[in-house]
Amino acid sequence: MERPGLFSTLRRLTGHSLVYGSADVATQVVNLLLTPLYVAFLTPDDFGLLAVLLLFESVAKIVFRMGLDAGFLRIHYDLPDENERRRLAGTVALFSAAAGALLLAAIVLGAPLVVRALFGQPAPELGRYVILKAADVYVGTFLFVPLVLLRIRDQPGRFASLTATRNALNTALKVLLVVRGAGVGGVLWSDLIATSALALALAPILWRGARLAWVPGYLRSVLTFCLPKAPHGIMVQLLNLSDRRFLLGYLGRAVTGFYDKAYALGAGVKFVMSPFESAWQPFIYSHAGQPDGPRLFARVVTYIWAVFLAVGLAVAIFGRELLMVFTFTNPAFWIAAPVVPIVSLAYLLHGTFLLTSIGIGIEKKARYYPMITASAAAVNLTGNFLLIPRWGMLGAAWATVAAYAVMAALGFWFSQRLYPIPFEAGRLTRLSAAAVASFLLAQLVPAPDLSGLSSAAAGSRVHFLLHIASRALMPTVAAKLALLAVFPALVVAFGVVRAEEWARLQSWRAGRRPRTQ
């Protein structure tokens, strides 16, 4: 029998995902649309350098923040009154500012060592880039307390509008500075200025929500909760980004830049995954104690997996064409097209981990996270070491797939022993089979015809894009669109959709149908 309220529960989960993730997703979309501009003014070497700096930034954020945002959110609800909660906020904000200042000073003093570790060679310019990125990370530590306060007060609209304004300012500055020839430095200054502006905008929220205080007991409680998760976060970032460092060492900045652009397209599954993740944990924690919680999670996972598969399939099928369009101002990037579907598969496996490892969080067994991600990171590092010298960019992508497969398998194994969930294995398998069959059929479509490309490239970039679209891409895209429609047809043919779901769909369609006079 259908659980009452299942579809309304799904609507609430979707609504929360859209609100909290809308700003970040919109920014990712805008940056993707601006890719032709970026590749016109930045070289592949520049993109390779930025990719390695992103690795540094991702690890630095975890070290600077130390999971204090999660610890603050958790301990906040244990305190008896608003005054004590404000003292907690003040304590966490003061500790974060002081610890971050010490870490920033250490990076400034040790910049040559950091540069050598990241790039394998010392260079004053690279040292300035590292310091700029570290300064941006430090300023970001002033954001998490007020942003968590907005979430606690259930103000998603204000949360989204502030972060969207910051992202819009960042994008505008990047366009202005990159076009004016500021290069990599312009990108880094844009990040720092936009983060500083958001910190100033959030200052009144921090002032009202925090009290200048220092309570060691509260700080110990926060650190006890959050510090075990820090290694997990570092391992995840190494898993995501260490391949750039290996590519830089083996094949140089240009190849690293090619790979990074293709990787960003393959990771397009995150457009739905990132906002969903923001709402997923509150959702599972609020329903975990219900008697039918495991069954509810199993049904929801099936629907979410169908969405993940549809997006991942679209990215994988149209990866080559998307890369051609978004980097038409520099066709050198097209060499990385085969990377896109492989990375899309990797992020689908990451989605599997998000959906099936929820028992670890429900049972508060955070110690398993570092074990899982350490295993996955070890597989990733080993794969990069073995595969990149022989297979280059493809080796890096497949190493990422192997690592996420290990992460998903271990997450599922531990979670099921802690909090068993009766996942709908049959439906999940048939959904996956439909996606695989659709992708394989799409591979029968011939590659775009690039004859006459050199003569078109001699003209303006607009004419070049029109040539690609009209003569090379349109026939291929039309054929792949037709084959993409095979996926829902196979979902139905494989018996994934149940009778009550058909009834719900028919009811929805009837409600949407215009009434006749």
Image (cartoon, grey):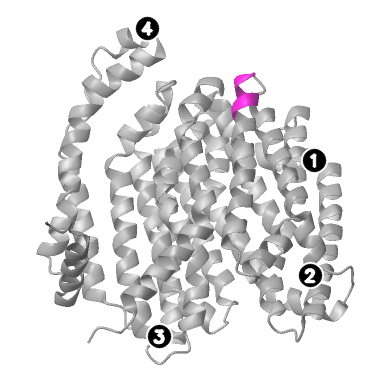
Describe the element under mark 3 as helix, strand or loop.
helix
Task: Identify which amino acid the numbered label 3 is placed on.
Answer: Gly
Residue 185: x and y, percent?
Answer: 69, 29
Say which label, 2 or 4, has the lower sequence index. 2
The residue sitting at 50% across, 81% down in the picture is: 286
* Quadrant where the image shows the C terminus: bottom left
Q: Amino acid at mark 2?
A: Ala
Indicate which disc, 4 or 1, sits on the residue closer to the N terminus: 1
Q: Is residue 375 visible?
A: no
Name above or below for residue 18 compared with residue 417: above
> Which labelled disc corresponds to residue 458?
4
Q: For the N terminus, give its image quadrant.
A: bottom left
Can you say whether 370 is above or below 105 in the image? Answer: below
Label 4: how many Cα within 10 Å (few below 14, some 14–19, many 20+): few
Residue denoted by label 3: 293
Specify the label residue 89 is tagged with: 2
Residue depicted at 57% across the width and 81% down the height: 365
Q: Residue beneath label 1, please?
A: 111
Local crowd at mark 2 within 10 Å, few (<14), some, or many (≥20)?
A: many
Identity of the residue drawn at 57% across and 82% down: 364
Secondary structure found at label 4: loop
Task: Give how far apart the Cα atoms at labels 2 and 4 are.
Answer: 60 Å
